[in-house]
């Protein structure tokens, strides 16, 4: 029995509504980043004016069973060029591999720069406990976080992030960008290739030894990472910062102390980065750093199962976001899902086909214009030709994988 006309009219009205919301999101929200006046500069003029006048800073890395990654990437962190005093504090979170031996090697090479805090026994899931210990032990009040498996794009990563943190007195949090490698280490920017190549004398392997072919998974991981970054940067520019990534995040100790550290979400194993931002960030105390030299690269997962575990870990934290953030993000996601699935239903039944197609291509054209500019800002221009496919897959992902993890069992591990 055919559905009554009123049913398809309702579906059509919902499709129009979802599409209008999507157009508003892409032009009104994502457009904040796409057309951001500072997006094409290395650092805003106000930060450059204060360069060289930053306070001392501590870089913190929490490592659990990360011996190989520390061999590979720690030299690039130690090679940072910064005019003010700074230290690198590595928290060895009860590692059971050769992490302690590797850190001893680097400490002998860099006795005045590198400090190691050893946690003898693992007492809780996640890395919040080890990170809290690291923050408490840091010598300086400006803190910069990254991970053991990450590579700064240049020796000026620290300087750029510190400049943004010092640019305005009210700035307490700086959101840096953490893209995936293009394929592998050998596909990164010129600066990061040079940084990696220069580290081999300190015990790490050269970048050529870690070259691997770009795969469908790595392409998707790069696209999704860029999309998520574009979303939280755009909302931050709109005055609603809601998350950041721990592989490239700077903040002042005062804001960590003011919100009680991780106390509000200590029961969640993940979220040592985005939940801290979600609790502490606001329109006036948050800044972005999108200078290409400030990027911190990481590898995409090597298998779909590893990617799914990573998504589960990330999504488990979003359940305790502030309610305004959850409502707005749900609206963005549901309108994206609705636009595609209602479009498919209307096309298959032939209801108002010309109008439906016209609205569909108007939205897709808008996504290409806005996201295309964002991809240039985030130095991922080669993903432009995959927007149409991956935008549709994003709707499928949001409709299936995300709800599965949000309502399923939350089991998150830290190596």
Image (spheres, helix red, strand yellow):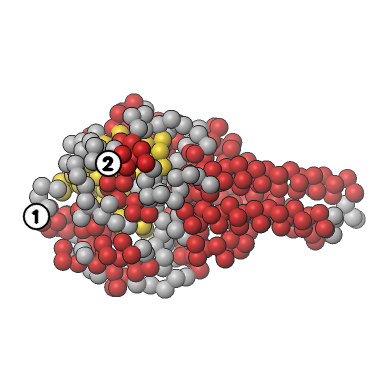
Q: Quadrant of the N terminus?
A: bottom right
Residue 308's x, y, as percent?
48, 57
Dot 2 surroundings within 10 Å: few (below 14), some, or many (20 or more)?
A: some
In the rendered view, does 27 fall on the left or right side of 303? right
> Whole-Å distance between the Cαs marked 1 and 2?
31 Å
Q: Secondary structure at mark 2?
A: loop
Mark 1 residue element:
helix
Residue 94 place in picture, x, y as percent? 23, 49
> In this orientation, does residue 108 appear?
yes
Left or right of 363? Residue 171 is: left
Q: List x then y, in percent, for residue 352.
A: 85, 55
Residue 51: mark: 2
Question: x%, y% of residue 350?
Answer: 84, 59
Whichever of callouts 1 and 2 sits on the residue coming sooner in the sequence is: 2
Front-most of 261 and 129?
261
Looking at the image, is 40 positioned above or below residue 183?
Answer: above
Compared with 143, 156 (above or below) is below
**What residue is shown at x 70% (from left), y 51% (from top)?**
339
What residue is drawn where x is 50% and y is 68%?
216
* Residue at the disc numbered 1: 108
Instruction: Look at 10% across and 47% down and name the residue there.
Output: 112
């Amino acid at each position: 029995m055919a559905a009554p006309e009123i049913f398809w009219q309702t579906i059509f009205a919902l499709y129009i509504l979802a599409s209008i919301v999507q157009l508003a999101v892409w032009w009104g929200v994502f457009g904040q980043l796409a057309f951001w006046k500072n997006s094409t500069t290395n650092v805003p003029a106000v930060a450059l004016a204060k360069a060289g006048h930053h306070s001392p800073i501590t870089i913190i890395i929490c490592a659990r069973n990360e011996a190989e990654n520390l061999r590979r990437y720690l030299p690039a962190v130690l090679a940072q060029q910064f005019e003010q005093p700074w230290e690198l504090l590595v928290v060895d979170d009860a590692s059971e591999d050769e992490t302690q031996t590797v850190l001893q090697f680097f400490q002998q090479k860099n006795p005045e720069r590198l400090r190691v805090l050893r946690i003898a026994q693992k007492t809780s899931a996640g890395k919040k406990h080890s990170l809290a210990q690291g923050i408490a032990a840091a010598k300086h009040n400006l803190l910069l976080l990254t991970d053991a498996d990450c590579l700064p794009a240049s020796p000026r990563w620290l300087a750029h992030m510190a400049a943004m943190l010092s640019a305005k007195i009210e700035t307490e949090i700086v959101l840096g960008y953490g893209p995936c490698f293009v394929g592998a280490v050998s596909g990164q920017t010129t600066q990061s290739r040079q940084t990696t190549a220069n580290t081999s004398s300190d015990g790490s392997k050269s970048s050529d030894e870690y070259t691997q072919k770009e795969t469908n998974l790595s392409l998707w991981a790069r696209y999704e990472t860029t999309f998520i970054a574009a979303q939280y940067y755009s909302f931050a520019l709109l005055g609603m910062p809601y998350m950041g990534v721990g592989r490239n995040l700077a903040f002042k100790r005062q804001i960590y102390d003011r919100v009680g550290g991780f106390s509000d979400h200590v029961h969640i194993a993940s979220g040592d980065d985005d939940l801290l931002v979600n609790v502490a960030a606001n329109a006036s105390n948050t800044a972005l750093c999108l200078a290409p030299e400030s990027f911190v690269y990481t590898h995409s997962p090597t298998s779909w199962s590893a990617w799914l575990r990573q998504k589960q870990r990330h999504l488990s934290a979003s359940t305790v976001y502030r309610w305004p953030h959850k409502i707005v993000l749900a609206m963005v996601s549901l309108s994206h899902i609705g636009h595609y699935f209602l479009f498919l239903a209307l096309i298959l039944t032939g209801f108002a086909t010309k109008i439906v197609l016209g609205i569909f291509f108007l939205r897709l054209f808008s996504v290409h214009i806005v996201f295309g500019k964002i991809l240039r800002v985030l130095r991922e221009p080669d993903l432009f030709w995959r927007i149409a496919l991956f935008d549709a897959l994003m709707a499928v992902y949001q409709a299936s994988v995300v709800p599965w993890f949000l309502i399923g069992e939350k089991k998150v591990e830290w190596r």
